[in-house]
Image (spheres, rainbow, N blue to C red):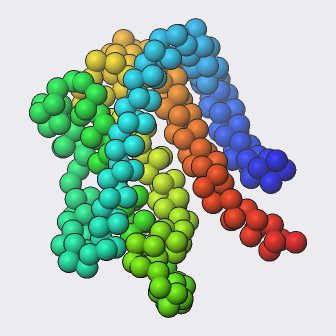
Amino acid sequence: MRPLLRSLWPPLLVLAVLLGGWQLYVTAAGVDPTTLPSPARVVEQGWLNRRDLWDQTLPTLQETLLGFALSFAAAWLVAVLLDFSSAARRGLYPLLVASQTIPIVAVAPLLIIWFGFGLLPKMLVVTLTTFFPLAANLAAGFAATDREAMRLLRSLGAGRLRTFRLVRVPSAMPYFFAGLRVSITYAVVGAVFAEYAGAEAGLGIYMQAQKSAFRTDLVFAAVAVTAALSIALFGATYLLQRLVLPWERALKEDRSS
């Protein structure tokens, strides 16, 4: 708990200073709330409208989790294919890199046109936004496997699949979780952007509606909810890593002792 508190208090202190300066400026300058609401007003109006915010958060969270689950499965499938086949690696990896040059801002409206305003296009935007860091890091983790450990298992008669399961997958896990943390920070933003392109419900469409009504305070409240979701999912990756890789914690304790 103490290491966690030591790591959290510096950013929390900076955030408190920024919010305090924002509050002082808006109060002293008498800024119109429709232009720039104070943090206190954002919190107040967000709490008063918490039911609406919650109702709009649920669709966004659903799009995020389902889209990220699809990205997760596709990343593993592609990374394993790249690892097992040099021909696939030569043919697919350049295309994966080139796919990152396609702007999502142009693709998202097309997905809405093709698949409508339902769940599927939002899932696809989240998948496209988060897929590459997952697949690229996982493929890099497979490639970084200790060659000596591979030779040892093969000398003991282990086949390729067994060697992959016992050596290559565990060695790729730190790379995978690094990519997971990068991707998860984009997931909620991808869902919100997809809703901006066209949706029936969600934080993105809620922000648009409140912006049109000059409720800047509620736009900021929705932004704060989006940030909170991203931070919560980011933090969940550390918990998942501790559950999947329990030996990492034991190694760190041995090194520190």
Q: Residue at x 52, y 87 (%)?
A: 156
Q: Residue at x 80, y 74 (%)?
A: 255
Quarter of the image for residue 126 reads: top left
Q: Residue at x 43, y 36 (%)?
A: 65
**Which of these two is toward me, 58 or 50?**
58
| Left or right, residue 170 beside residue 140 | right
**Which of these two is toward me, 53 or 180?**
180
Quarter of the image for residue 190 reads: top left
Q: Quadrant of the C terminus?
A: bottom right
- Residue 143 visible in the current orientation: no
In x, y percent, where is residue 66? 38, 36
Q: Is residue 76 above or below residue 48?
A: below
| Left or right, residue 40 beside residue 1 | left
Q: Is residue 63 above or below residue 244?
A: above
Q: Residue at x 84, y 50 (%)?
A: 2
- Residue 256 visible in the current orientation: yes
In x, y percent, where is residue 138? 42, 65
| Left or right, residue 196 beside residue 18 | left
**Which of these two is toward me, 119 or 42?**
119
In x, y percent, where is residue 252? 75, 68
Q: Is residue 100 above or below residue 216?
A: below
**Which of these two is toward me, 24 or 130?**
130
